[in-house]
Amino acid sequence: MMKHRFNILQLACIASIFVFASCSKDENTTPTYTVPTTYTFDNVDSLPAKTTLSMFTEMENLINTGNTANTVVSSAKLGGMYANTGSYFTDTIFNGTTINLNTSGVSLYGQTSSNAQAIVAGILDSVAVASQSTSAASSGIAGVSSKKTLLTANGVYLRQYFTKTLMGAVIGHLTCDVYLGDSLNSNISMAAKAHAWDQAFFLWCVPSNFPANRAKVKYWGSYTSQIDSGIAKPVASLTGINANPTLMNAFLKGRAALANNDLVTAKAQAAIIIAKFEIMEAAATLHEINEAKGNIINGAATVCGNLSESFGFITALKLNTHRTIASDAQINSIIALYPSNFWNATQQDLDNIINAISAIYGWDAVKGNL
């Protein structure tokens, strides 16, 4: 993944928006309150989000062991971690609090959208099978590549495919369906709604003073910056995706609204975030194809890695039940453009995917840099 710098214009935009008060649309009351410029509120709760992210990372670490030749990844352990059975996790400490992952009552399987659970289980099965190969990876042969990546016979880099798919099927699902969807529309207390909102923010995996501070960003916290800035370095102009300012503005305004019993404004901000996830998934899909184009000179194994990331994002986009711009048929037509064997990807294959996504989302002016 590429590192991207924060653009000062994004911070200026955020600061200018939040120095004044917000009002609800309720006809009887007009609560007035100040929206802070950082995610700093009373009684912020991030531990459930940290539990999910810690499990996610520990599963990635286990899959990564397969990137060393002749290292078999246990199918039983992969399945046990996904279902959180067998006590395979190592407890983690966050801000002095120990998170007991094995006894948390949480499983990534249970937090995966129902339409993705079989897909994720299939990826884990493929990891176990491919890791048993004693051959080096090459076209038609599973194994570890010259880039130290565990690939299937058709060149899918399984760890990246796992990560990008779960960024939609777990993080996107929890954010959009559970914390900003069901929770805001349930009969739980306003304080509980605020805590649910906190989980959605921290699943973004950014610090409270993001994007001024970009330390330890991960998952969508990294990719929202990447798709905003594009692949050109140094950054000459932003791509126009505006994921960082859009999400930060909405998260701050929505959390301030909940703290002031303004559910109408909170729901409006939730709708902004939920809609943005489709844009983020589509932009990240295209972004990785641009990365693949740039890596053709570095060999097919490297291109396989980028294509696998892109394929994970397009899988997440297909599973996104809040998608309103691209139809199912359009998504399936894009997926059909991926070569059946990533080792054989051509410049024309990559351009076809980019052009198809750009045509749907209107990104022709930025598709070369996104």
Image (tube, rainbow, N blue to C red):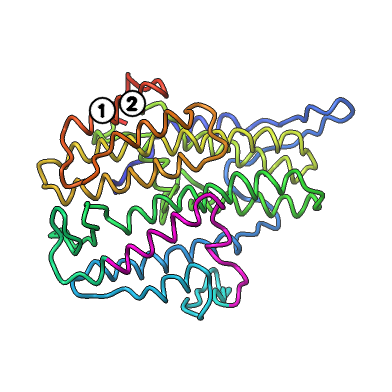
Gap between marks 1 and 2 measured at Cα: 6 Å
Q: Secondary structure at mark 1?
A: helix
Residue beneath the point at 16% across and 72% down:
134
User: Which of 73/55 is in front?
Assistant: 73
**Can you identify the residue that label 1 sits on?**
352
| Quarter the C terminus occupies | top left
The secondary structure that most of the magenta stretch takes on is helix
Horizontal side of residue 214 vs 51, given as left or right: left
Residue beneath the point at 23% across and 36% down:
233
- The kind of residue on which mark 2 rests is Ala
Horizontal side of residue 188 vs 157, given as left or right: right
Q: Secondary structure at mark 2?
A: helix
Residue beneath the point at 56% across and 39% down:
321
- The kind of residue on which mark 1 rests is Asn
Could you say where residue 30 lies in the image, as x and y percent from the top left? 83, 29
Badge 1 vs badge 2, beta-carbon distance below 8 Å: yes
Residues shaded magenta: 103-129
How many residues crowd around disc 1 within 10 Å: few (fewer than 14), some, or many (20 or more)? Answer: some
How many residues crowd around disc 2 within 10 Å: few (fewer than 14), some, or many (20 or more)? Answer: some
Q: Residue 232 occupies which quadrant of the picture?
A: top left
**Can you identify the residue that label 2 sits on?**
356
Q: Residue furthest right?
A: 28
Residue beneath the point at 37% across and 36% down:
227
* In magenta stretch: residue 118: yes
Q: Residue 157 occupies which quadrant of the picture?
A: bottom left
Q: Is residue 287 above or below residue 367?
A: below
Could you say where residue 142 lies in the image, as x and y percent from the top left? 20, 61
Could you say where residue 113 lies in the image, as x and y percent from the top left? 55, 52
